[in-house]
Image (cartoon, grey):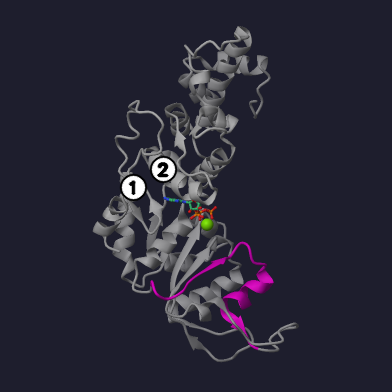
Amino acid sequence: MSAVEFDQERESAGTSVGSAYADSEPLSGTRALAKPRSMAGVIGNADVLVDLFRMIDRVADTTCTVLVTGESGTGKELVAKAVHEASPRASRPFVAVNCGAIPEALLESELFGHVRGAFTGAHATKVGRIGVCQGGTLFLDEVGELPLSLQVKLLRLLQSHEFSPVGDSKTYKADVRIVAATNVDLEEAVASGRFREDLFYRLNVIHLQVPALRDRREDIPALVDYFFESAGKRLGRPGMALSSDALRALLEWNWPGNVRELENTIERALLLAPASIIEVRDLPTKIRGLGTENRPGAALPDGGVDLRNAVEQFENNLIRQALERTAWNKNQAARLLGLNRTTLVEMLKRKRMGAKVA
Ligand SMILES: Nc1ncnc2c1ncn2[C@@H]1O[C@H](COP(=O)(O)OP(=O)(O)OP(=O)(O)O)[C@@H](O)[C@H]1O
Ligand SMILES: [Mg+2]
């Protein structure tokens, strides 16, 4: 897929951003900015993401090894698939191996295969993932978890494009393009001796950094729209919409779990919302933030309100947000709240707010 195509893909599909929003109240920095682009299912319009699309497009044609880094849930696997799908190998297999999820004793045979009798229990010859992947793309997820013994074998594969199944003295040619991913700092792993430096350089020929969602909040409306459409159909709740307050709460949240957390939040809201419009109250408590019910000037409910309780809740909510946004840095949180640090610390003590805030 070319850079121009990824630009136009969703537009030609007739999807317009904002279609899922319930009211027409203009929200600066959200709907107006978002014209979604996508590349092989990776949705995003932020400059950092468009740069990533360009990089994917540029490297796809080559057989260079690619290292995809980013926090958990940012879309590393999706990016790896986009590299594959934009490459001449698209019609060949994309084979993913999670190096962190397969026990060390099995991983070698899983990757390289084994011959009959290679070890106890090897009753038949088995083709490994590299064999299955011939002509395609091998995605090595959580590559930082690869044991040192297998790092040597992977290095050999990258250098000579050859491999030997376990128990086989012959070598075979491997025609695989390697895309690896990690959410750990590989340079640090190299420094501490857990990862081979030569392998790191071999893997890191092209580095694709997938940005955290909090660093591209402008993509949230487009992603919400996308999840409404895809999950709405799957969960049997099509045509759902989001109130502007709920969108505002989503835009304010820090998203430590990135796009995966957003996807789960939308799915949960789609399932639980009693009406066709998702309101702030349908979002998880931690995300609710400054929705209508927490905003100054919120409408007085018919049945009245417990003022002290409401004010306390409002205060706690803002403090919690400030702390979460600053990763519990009390100096920075106090600044966000217009307080000095001592006052904030005293308030936390009085409110018995420890590491977790109710
Ligand atoms: N830009 C995006 N557009 C659409 N969906 C996305 C995007 N990024 C991530 N997702 C979705 O979020 C979920 C997590 O993505 P993915 O598994 O690729 O993340 P990851 O970085 O590999 O996470 P982990 O480090 O936990 O393995 C998937 O369901 C994926 O489809
Ligand atoms: Mg992953």
Q: Nearer the viewer, residue 46 or 239?
A: 239
- Farthest residue to the right: give it: 120
Q: Residues within 10 Å of mark 2 (few under 14, many from 20)?
A: many
Between the C-alphas of marks 1 and 2, the distance is 9 Å
Q: Position of residue 123 (x, y in %)?
A: 72, 86
- Farthest residue to the left: give it: 4
Amino acid type at image mark 2: Asp
Which residue appears at 52% of the width and 47% of the height? 260
Amino acid type at image mark 1: Thr
Task: Please say whether residue 38 is visible from this viewpoint.
Answer: yes
Residue 168: quadrant of the picture? bottom right
Task: Please say whether residue 184 is visible from this viewpoint.
Answer: no
- Farthest residue to the bottom: give it: 170
* Vertical position of residue 81 compared to residue 328: above or below: below
Quadrant including the C terminus: top right
Which residue appears at 32% of the width and 28% of the height? 28
Circle 1: element type: loop
Counting labels gives: 2
Q: Is residue 226 left or right of residue 321?
A: left
Which residue appears at 51% of the width and 14% of the height? 340
Q: Which residue is mark 1?
A: 15
Q: Position of residue 244 (x, y in %)?
A: 42, 28
Quadrant including the N terminus: bottom left
**Where does the magenta region start and end?**
90-115
Circle 2: element type: helix
Q: Earlier in the sequence, mark 1 or mark 2?
A: 1
Residue 108: quadrant of the picture? bottom right
Q: Position of residue 237 (x, y in %)?
A: 52, 44
Q: Are marks 1 and 2 in contact (CB under 8 Å)?
A: yes
Q: Mark number for residue 26?
A: none
Q: Nearer the viewer, residue 337 or 330?
A: 337
Q: Which residue is mark 2?
A: 225
